[in-house]
Image: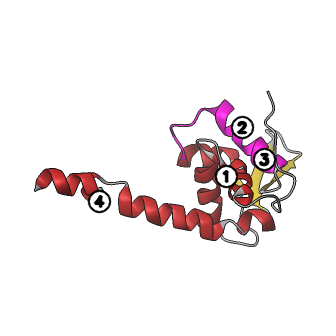
Amino acid sequence: MARTRHRSLDCSPGCAVEATLQLIDGKWKGVILYHLLDEVPEPEGALRFSALRRRMPNVTQRMLTNQLRELEADGLVHRTVYAEVPPRVEYRLTARGRSLAPVIRALKAWGDAHATPEASPEAGSRAA
C-alpha cells in the first residue's frame, strides 16, 4: 500500500517536520543518504549499487532497491543506468538530497554522542 506523502511543507505547524521525516523514514534511507553524502566527492561522485551494498552489509538487496526507489521518487537521489553488459547503475544525490546534509550530519553526531552505553544517562546512574 502506497503511503500518503506531503506535496508541500507549508501546512500546519509541525507539519513540515512530519513531511521531512516522511522523506527520510525507513530503516535504511538515512544510512543511504549518509553514504552518498560523506563517501562520494561532488560533483562527479556517485556510488554503484554494489558499493552501497558493501557499505551496508545488513541490508537485503530487495530492501536497498526499494529504499533507493523511494529516495529517487522523492527527488533526493538520481539514478543513472548505463547501457553496458552487465548493466551499471550509479546513484548520486540531487541538489534537494544534498540539502539534507546538515540534518544527516546532525543525526550522526547525535548518534556518536548517545549511541554508546557509556553515553546514556542511565549508564551513569547504574554506575553510581
Report the disc number at residue 97: none
Report the disc number at residue 21: 1
Q: Label 2's element?
A: helix
Picture coordinates of residue 86 (x, y %)? Answer: 79, 38
Looking at the rendering, the stretch of residues picked out in magenta corresponds to: 56-73
Q: Label 3's element?
A: strand
Q: Which residue is mark 3?
A: 89
In the rendered view, does 34 fall on the left or right side of 88? Answer: left
Point 55% across, 67% down: residue: 105
Which residue is farthest top? 1
- The mark lying in front, picked from 3 and 1, is 1
- Residue type at mark 2? Thr
Point 40% across, 62% down: residue: 112
Magenta: main secondary structure equals helix
Nearest to the observer: residue 76 or residue 19: 19
Residue 72 painted magenta:
yes
Q: Label 4's element?
A: helix
Q: Earlier in the sequence, mark 2 or mark 3?
A: 2
- Residue type at mark 4? Ala
Report the disc number at residue 65: 2
Q: CA distance from mark 1 to mark 2?
A: 20 Å
Q: Quadrant of the C terminus?
A: bottom left
Residue 71 painted magenta:
yes
